[in-house]
Image (cartoon, rainbow, N blue to C red):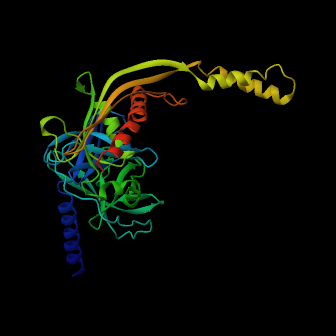
Amino acid sequence: MKGPFRTLASTLMFCAACSFARAEPVEVRQGEYIGAGYSFRRGNACTVVTARHVVPDIGASITVLDRSGAKVEGSRSYDNEFYDLALVALPDVRTIACTTTWPDRAPPVGTNIPATKEFQAIRHYPSGRETIVRLKSAGGIKHLLNLAPVDSLRIRESDSGAIVMLDGRPAGIVQSVDSGTDRVNVLRFDTIDQLVGDRFRSTGGGGVLNFEGVVWQGRIHPHWTTYLQAWLMEQAGKQVVTVSGPKAPTDLCSIRVEVLSWDRIAVPNPAYQNVQEQLKTCGKKGWLYEQMCRQARSTSQSTPRQLTSQKLTFNAIVQPPGAPALSKLATDSAVPKSGAPMTQAEIEMSSLQAVVGPVLKELLDRSSCD
């Protein structure tokens, strides 16, 4: 009796996992990168949880596909390099299936899990097919599970970001696999919940904004829109939908930013001025002065006289529903942080957030949008 009973129980568990995840696992693509993810609904917004290395490029478009073959373009709204975690915001929740809500309380997942407990990693195919990779505990650390395959079916590179279930509840997402041992590293879901859970739990409409986008030369600039959308979600803590034109919701506070000019201006480098002051110690007698002089000369070789400041002139508009619009025309500059080289996308993102962010915060504080 034990054999058939165990077989039946395993079958029921397998079917329960399939039912729970039937439409929610998604495929995530960015350029040549292909991975997996899991979609969660919050109010009218849909957000995909995945591994950061699946969507590594700032501002680059992300395509998300569900099991029906439906697809939608999204943008990275959160990333954490240390934990290899990212969120992808989708502009239209109706495009793909997105019905699962974030658990009210993340199930604790310890490292001392009996070998009899079975994990299921859900592999999704846009053709409608779905495969369950069976795994068992093989140890772990505070925020990572280390799992081993139960049978010949293995986790592969394109499974990065895939949801892993335990007893029908999310246990984590796939991060990496050791090809030599087939051990699978899984970021624990309770760790994910600590990092981003609060973004999913509130479903009230008070913090929901419609971000129409950033307009440049009469057109929506998709990358700049992504950068400010990330600021609204990460820094301002808002739920954001992105709809413009006639379909824009009239019951939500709407935001629009028009960039009128963006200039690059050379400005004096304060660090260079400091080095020049330190160089004045050269010629003075004493071991300490000699060391200070040597350090100043070394630093001066890599310290530019000038930095490139990003100067923006823009008009920010906040339109509360049923109330007069608030707007502010402003000009301000930002100098990207010195140190590690920054890509053009990183410079644009940091500059937009530094210059436009405070103005948006001021207008939102003055409006009735909260």
Q: In the orientation shown, which residue stands out farthest toward the right?
A: 285
- Residue 115 lies in quadrant: bottom left
Work out whether residue 5 or residue 322 is closer to the camera in this orientation and state it: 322
- Could you tell whether 53 is left or right of 131 in the image? right
Q: Residue at x 39, y 52 (%)?
A: 182
In the rendered structure, the answer to whether residue 356 lies left or right of residue 165 reads right
Q: Is residue 187 left or right of residue 24?
A: right
Q: Residue pushed farthest front? A: 324
Please state the horizontal and vertical placement of residue 215, each as a whole percent of the image: 26, 28
Q: Can residue 54 be spotted in the picture?
A: no
Outermost residue on the bottom side: it is 1
The number of numbered badges drawn on the structure is 0
Could you tell me residue 121's position as x and y percent? 29, 56
The residue that appears at 84% across and 22% down in the rendered structure is 284
Picture quadrant of residue 295: top right
The one nearer the camera, 291 or 278, is: 278
Q: Is residue 188 visible?
A: yes
The residue at the point 39 percent across, 25 percent down is 312
Q: Position of residue 12 (x, y in %)?
A: 19, 70
